[in-house]
Image (spheres, rainbow, N blue to C red):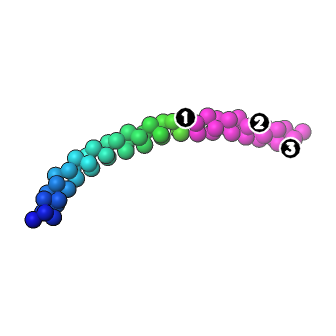
Amino acid sequence: MNWLADVIVVAWFFPVVVYGLIPLMIGVGWALGKLFGGVSERLAQLLATKDSGAVNDSLSQVAG
C-alpha cells in the first residue's frame, strides 16, 4: 500500500516537474544561447576582419 502512495505522489508531481523544468531549461538554454551567441558573433566578426585582411594582402601580393 505504501508503494501505491509513492506511485500516486510521483504521478502527481511528474507533470509539474516536467512542465516546470522544460520551460526553465528552454529559458536557461535561450539565455546561454544569447550570451554565447553574442560572444561567438564578436569572435566571428573579429575573425572575418582578420581573414578579409589576410585575403586582401594575399590578393595584393598575387596581383602585384
- Marks 3 and 2 close (CB-CB < 8 Å): no
Question: Which range is magenta?
Answer: 39-64
In the picture, measured across the screen, residue 57 lies left or right of residue 17, that is right
Q: Which residue is mark 3?
A: 62
Q: Horizontal and vertical percent for residue 35?
A: 51, 36
Q: Quadrant of the N terminus?
A: bottom left
Q: Horizontal and vertical percent for residue 53?
A: 76, 36
Tag 2, which secondary structure? Answer: helix
Q: Give, as a three-letter code, the residue at label 3.
A: Val
In the picture, measured across the screen, residue 61 lies left or right of residue 43, that is right
> In this orientation, which residue lies closer to the viewer: 10 or 21?
10
| Residue count near mark 1 (Cα–Cα under 10 Å), binned few <14, some 14–19, many ≥20 | few
Residue 11 showing in the rendered view:
no
Q: Horizontal and vertical percent for residue 58?
A: 82, 42
The tag on residue 38 is: 1
| Residue count near mark 3 (Cα–Cα under 10 Å), binned few <14, some 14–19, many ≥20 | few
The CA span between labels 3 and 1 is 35 Å
Overall secondary structure of the magenta stretch? helix
User: Mark 1 against mark 2, which lies toward the viewer?
Assistant: 1
